[in-house]
Image (cartoon, grey):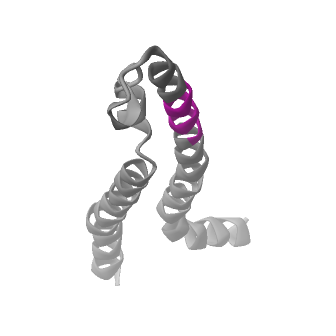
Amino acid sequence: MKEYLINFFVWWYVYKMSDYALYIKHRFTFLMIQTRALPMLKYLFTPLYGYDSFTGIIISFFIRITWGFWGLVLCCILVFPFLISFFIAMVLPLLPFYGLVQFAL
């Protein structure tokens, strides 16, 4: 029984958590690609759609600032559930032991 218990923790914290961390990384990368927040901030002063006049540059500046800001806000809001679920998954196998210790006292 002791060997199975140790193997479970090795499996959970080494293999399962690395898979889960990779899943979170892929979800965050997908979110950043879909919002296109970083490219909008990178090309802040380039005009949209090749409209090179001063008015086009000003309009594209405000569009890109708004798009980049709300994209980053959305990414920051959605990264918190990912992190909370990761920490819950880290603590989840330890909860039965916490209950056993509390029961023994």
Of residues 26 and 14, which is closer to you in this image?
Answer: 26
Q: Nearer the viewer, residue 6 or 38?
A: 38
Looking at the picture, how far across and down is residue 7, in whole percent? 27, 74
Q: Is residue 75 above or below residue 57?
A: below
Quarter of the figure with residue 63: top right
Instruction: Specify the principal SS of the magenta part.
Output: helix
Of 42 and 74, nearer the camera is 42
Q: Name the residue located 35 percent from the left edge and 26 percent from the top edge.
A: 42
List x then y, in percent, for residue 61: 49, 23
Residue 68 is inside the magenta segment: yes
Image vertical order of residue 16 relative to residue 37, above or below = below
Residue visible at 61% across and 47% down? 77
Range of magenta residues: 62-70
Reply above or below: 91 against 73: below
Q: Where in the figure is residue 41, as x and y percent of width and height?
A: 42, 28
Seen as rendered, the residue at the extreme bottom is: 1
**On the rendered image, what quadrant is the N terminus found in?**
bottom left
| Side of 36 where 103 appears, left or right | right
